[in-house]
Image: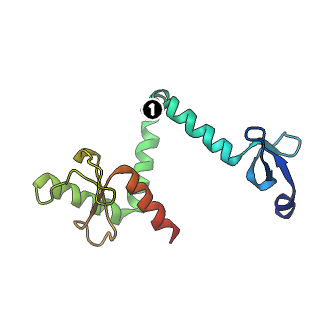
Amino acid sequence: MNSAECETQSRNCSKCGEAKLLSDFRERKGRRDNRLGQCRDCEHAYDRLYATSHILAIRSKNANWRKVNRDKCMESCRRNRIKNRQRSRCYGALQRAISKGVIVKPNECSICGAITPPAQLHGHHEDYGKPLVVIWLCHWCHIRQHSIRTRR
């Protein structure tokens, strides 16, 4: 089935019951129309609910995998440091400045103003050429900041 057909044909989601385009359903071979029964929105909602209700089991499973596959993890980190060398150097310079007392972490997010323990604040660099110029953000504001940045 080509993409033009997916944009014109519709079906009902087995979870929410709404009629949606075929392109709103993830592909799955072996099905009658090679699509899952629930739409992407319902699938994402289920994934979020599962992740929040099974967070300890997921963390334990991930920690065990990292312990068993330590070499793969180290290699992945090494490749990431090489690929993002300027970011890695910038992060290192910021950490050294914090440990020497040159920079002091505040206790609140610069965007939302939420009181956050300094260990949980992230130093966000707008420009990696200026390693000590950062905006202090909570986890969620940092995620939003990066999603805004990638959309530009």
Residue that appears at 37% across and 50% down: 139
Q: Position of residue 99 (x, y in %)?
A: 14, 52
Of residues 100 and 7, the one drawn nearer to the viewer in this rendering: 7
Q: How crowded is the residue under tag 1: few (<14 C-alpha within 10 Å), some, or many (20+)? A: few
As drawn, is 124 to the left or to the right of 49? left
Pinpoint residue 12: horizontal percent, then vertical percent: 82, 45
Q: Nearer the viewer, residue 8 or 85?
A: 8
Q: Locate residue 100: give its quadrant.
A: bottom left
Which residue is at a point 43% across and 61% down the rendered structure image?
Answer: 146
Compared with residue 77, is residue 68 higher up or lower down, i.e. above or below? above
Dot 1 lies on which element?
helix
The answer to whether residue 32 is left or right of residue 36 is right
Residue 17, x across and y down, in percent: 78, 42
Task: Say what amino acid the circle numbered 1 marks.
Answer: Arg
Q: How is the image coloured?
A: rainbow
Q: Is residue 13 above or below residue 137?
A: above
Residue at the disc numbered 1: 59
Q: Is residue 28 above or below residue 50?
A: below
User: Residue at coordinates 33% horizontally, 56% vertically from top-left?
Assistant: 112
Q: In front here: 134 or 129?
A: 134
Query: In this image, 45 relative to 144: left or right?
Result: right
In this rendering, the answer to whether 61 lies above or below 22 is: above
Q: Quadrant of residue 36?
A: top right
Residue 147, horizontal then vertical, whole percent: 48, 61
Most extreme residue toward the left is: 101
